[in-house]
Amino acid sequence: FNVYGAPVIGEHERWLGIVIVFQDITELKRLEQIRKDFVANVSHELRTPVTSIKGFSETLLDGAYKDTETLLSFLEIVHTESNRLEMLINDLLDLSKVEQSGFRVNAQPMNMEAVIKRAREMIQPKIDEKSIHLKLEIQPINVLGDANRLIQVMMNLLINAVTYSSNHTEITIRLFRKDNRAIIQVEDQGIGIESSEIERLFERFYRVDRARSRNSGGTGLGLSIVKHLIEAHHGQVEVDSTVGVGTTFTIYLPLAI
Ligand code: ADP
């Protein structure tokens, strides 16, 4: 609590009493903490690849470049870490854009099936790498949306589904209509998520297993971006998951009439 006090003085400078104000700053403190955590997280996430790039390039400059094998393997690391930095910066810029209160999507009637197929095409190499079987259960439905932004949403959900699944499992994408809304589901047979973690899943940089998720190449910002984008479409996103069984992300979007 913040506490302020002030005397109440009436006519002829007569003391009438004291006003004491108790201001509940729980919410302010919470927001301040979120902001501090965010800055700390960004700094940490940026520092990790930079430290690595600096370290490996310095070792090369100190003479390690003379050994071709070392040269190639260190350059490979520098390249991977630069890619990670680029992804992180792109996601941070995008998140700051979609988080702004004035952010709007350019929603138009569009074919959701085409969006799903486009996202799938982009992820196909990752799906093949893990010999995952992708099942499509799709009805022809037009939604009110921004095609590029919805491709981005679908790619994020699909990359996660593949990342957190074992080889030779199945991922199902569904598109159907219910109660005047379009429903899109991405269901995997992956590691699943504890119910206690689900509430925080859409927070910036929140990862169930920090080390594992970071090694898998994600930035920890994907689901925050997805939530903002779906809300900008006047839609909703939900998660249903069982540890060891799998996870289903469900998106609700307005239909195009
Ligand atoms: P990341 O880049 O780490 O994947 P996201 O914001 O996309 O970040 O996801 C946040 C966290 O949610 C992930 O680190 C992971 O722990 C968990 N997660 C997301 N999708 C799935 C999924 N399909 N199965 C299991 N865990 C998931």
Image: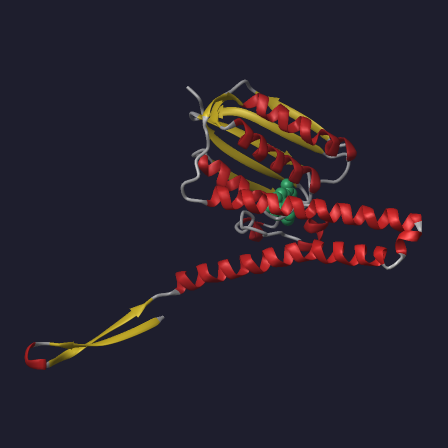
Question: In x, y percent, where is residue 121?
Answer: 68, 26
Residue 233 in view in this figure? yes
* Number of callouts: 0
Rendered location of residue 94, percent (x, y): 54, 42
Q: Position of residue 220 (x, y in %)?
A: 61, 48
Q: Residue at x 34, y 66 (%)?
A: 24
185 lies above or below 163: above
Colour basis: secondary structure
191 relative to 62 in the view: left or right: left
Where residue 157 appears, as percent x and y from the top left, is 61, 37
Q: Quadrant of the C terminus?
A: top left
The front one of 178 and 83 is 83
Residue 242 in sight in this render: no
Please tell me which residue is depicted at 66% across the width and 54% down the height of the picture: 210
Nearest the eye: 147 or 170: 147
Q: Residue at x 9, y 81 (%)?
A: 13
Q: Quadrant of residue 240?
A: top right
Query: Left of 98 or right of it: where is 10?
Result: left
Name the quadrant of the N terminus: bottom left
Nearest the viewer among 242 and 66 is: 66
Pick out the residue farthest to the left.
Answer: 12
For residue 120, above or below residue 197? above
**232 up-or-down from 145: above or below:** below
State which image quarter holds ligand 1.
Answer: top right
